[in-house]
Image (cartoon, rainbow, N blue to C red):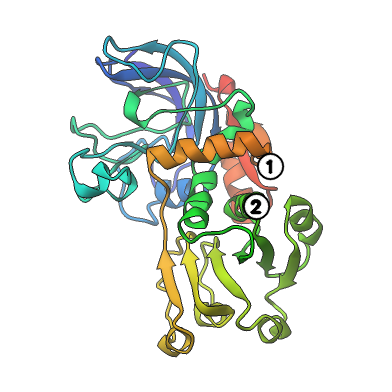
Amino acid sequence: MPTAFAYAAPSATGDLALTTIERREPGAHDVHIEIKFAGICHSDIHTVRGEWGPQQYPLAPGHEIAGIVRAVGADVTKHKVGDRVGVGCMVNSCRECSNCQAGEEQYCLKGNVGTYGSVDRDGTITQGGYSSDVVVNEDFVVGIPEALDLDVAAPLLCAGITTYSPLRHWGAGPGKKVAVVGLGGLGHMAVKLAHAMGAEVTVLSQSLKKMEDGLNLGADHYFATSDPATFEQLAASFDLIVNTVSASIDISSYIQLLTLDGTLVNVGAPAEPLPVNVFSLIMGRRSFAGSAIGGIRETQEMLDFCAEHGLGAEIEVIPAPKINEAYERVLASDVRYRFVIDTSTIG
């Protein structure tokens, strides 16, 4: 199955268009997946437009992949034909470094192989999920529980795990006060997950226009950060703040909302540096941290948790020819809360 249909960017400035891409022939440990749905992540836009560094084109993005196994290599033991599976933000790693051995492949010391726009171990450039098919090593494929529909499961492979991992790592749960900055693709999942973990959840958003949504998703409180009184009222309130926005904000003001020993963790990735007033950290033994996605083991744990609690992404399903329009709507914050491509419309 060397050829697949895909929507790919021809350059950093060109619209994504229908094309064909080459997929490798499945090897002994490979899984051939017929992609059913692919989420659109803000990082797709950053990447194809060259905002995070130069790319090789044509480039098919997409790292929120849900589909069905159509073939497996001779030595595959983890998946079988007909399985409902997902692929997230990485498709390989060295497997040998201390981080990989610990099940934290996302922090591979030699660099994990991203699902698209990365150099794979065989020297080829990876192509992502805006396509009809993909071939992935079995170790980087996760099972999607039957309780989750494939369309709402697709965004969990990035937005879900990107928020689940820091919530778990920093101990969100009963008795903990968690704030989520931004109610978008990442933020809405952070609210759902933190609520399901038993934390008291507050949304910090620029305005109150999504307040009803936030409360319905599981938030206990909702505040507008455009109101200076918010920062006075909530000073020293939160054990954990998860910042999901990909824009530059006054991070020191948010750090001052942390309790003693509280942590603000960034999962949004703005292109610009975020200056920090060190006194906001010192005066409260606070921490400013970052978190990427989770490892494969944790990603499977997240999917199982979502299935147990009935959690999926809030989505708008679109046909592939509307990808470019969807990009503009993402940039205008005109989506509640994740676009998902019906890949049957590709080709």
Q: What residue sits right under mark 1 in the picture?
A: 314
Q: Position of residue 62 (x, y in %)?
A: 46, 37
Q: Residue at x 58, y 29 (%)?
A: 320
In what quadrant of the picture does the N terminus appear? Answer: top left
**Which three-letter amino acid code belongs to the residue tagged 1?**
Glu
- Mark 2 highlights which residue? 188
* Callout 2 crowding tier (Cα within 10 Å): few <14, some 14–19, many ≥20: many
Residue at image location 41% in from the left, 68% down from the top: 289
Name which quarter of the figure residue 61 lies in.
top left
Could you tell me residue 128's position as x and y percent? 41, 33
Q: Tell me what residue is drawn at x 60 percent, y 73 percent.
A: 238
Q: Are marks 1 and 2 in contact (CB under 8 Å)?
A: yes
Q: Amino acid at mark 2?
A: His
Q: Earlier in the sequence, mark 1 or mark 2?
A: 2
Residue 247 is left or right of residue 56, and the answer is right
- Comparing 199 with 61, the one in front is 199
Give the side of residue 216 with respect to residue 332, left or right: right
**Residue 98 can be seen, yes or no:** yes
Count neighbours of disc 1 (C-alpha within 10 A) and say few if under 14, some if 14 to 19, many if 20 or more.
many
Instruction: List x then y, in percent, for residue 192.
Output: 66, 50
Camera-nearest residue between 154 and 55: 154
Left or right: where does residue 225 sit relative to residue 321? Answer: right
